[in-house]
Amino acid sequence: MGIIRLNNIRVFSFHGCMDEEAKIGSDYRVDLEAKGDFRNAAASDQLHDSIDYVHLNRIVKQEMAIRSKLLENVCQRIIDRVLLEISMVEEVKVAVSKINPPVGGDVESVTVEMQGVR
């Protein structure tokens, strides 16, 4: 079993329950971890035997561009697409962080983390 991590994918998006969040948007950070069997990739040195991190990044960016009220919804959509589109992924963990959330205090970020298993 191997792990590939995409750390600190930075995006600007419009998630949140408040109307203002839909209008002004916010900065987000996404971290993704995908597990799979990398033995064939290690032996062949071919991308088609591995988990393509460009594909993972594209899924994250596309799903982050779709407005949701809850970060849980965004996480689940990313998980679902990764498991649907990349058959080599056996398990995926996604953390979506809203930077400077509007919580009425000095909070650097709020994070929702979820995982899915094939």
Image (cartoon, helix red, strand yellow):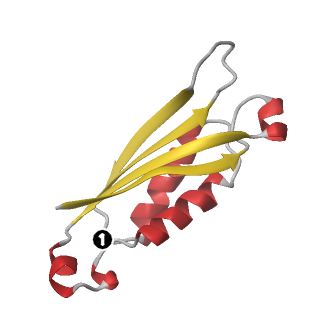
Q: Secondary structure at mark 1?
A: loop
The residue identified by callout 1 is 88
Instruction: Residue at 36% x, 50% y: name it.
Output: 116
Q: Position of residue 36 (x, y in %)?
A: 24, 64
Instruction: Residue at 57% x, 46% y: name it.
Output: 74
Residue 95 figure quarter: top left
Instruction: Residue at 57% x, 25% y: name it.
Output: 108
Q: Position of residue 84 (x, y in %)?
A: 43, 67
Residue 79 figure quarter: bottom left
Residue 78 vs residue 44, the one in the foreground? 44
Q: Is residue 117 left or right of residue 29?
A: left
Image quadrant containing the C terminus: bottom left
Q: Position of residue 77 (x, y in %)?
A: 53, 53
Instruction: Count all numbered tags in the image, as a single digit.
Output: 1
Q: Is residue 42 above or below residue 106?
A: below
Q: Position of residue 23 (x, y in %)?
A: 84, 39
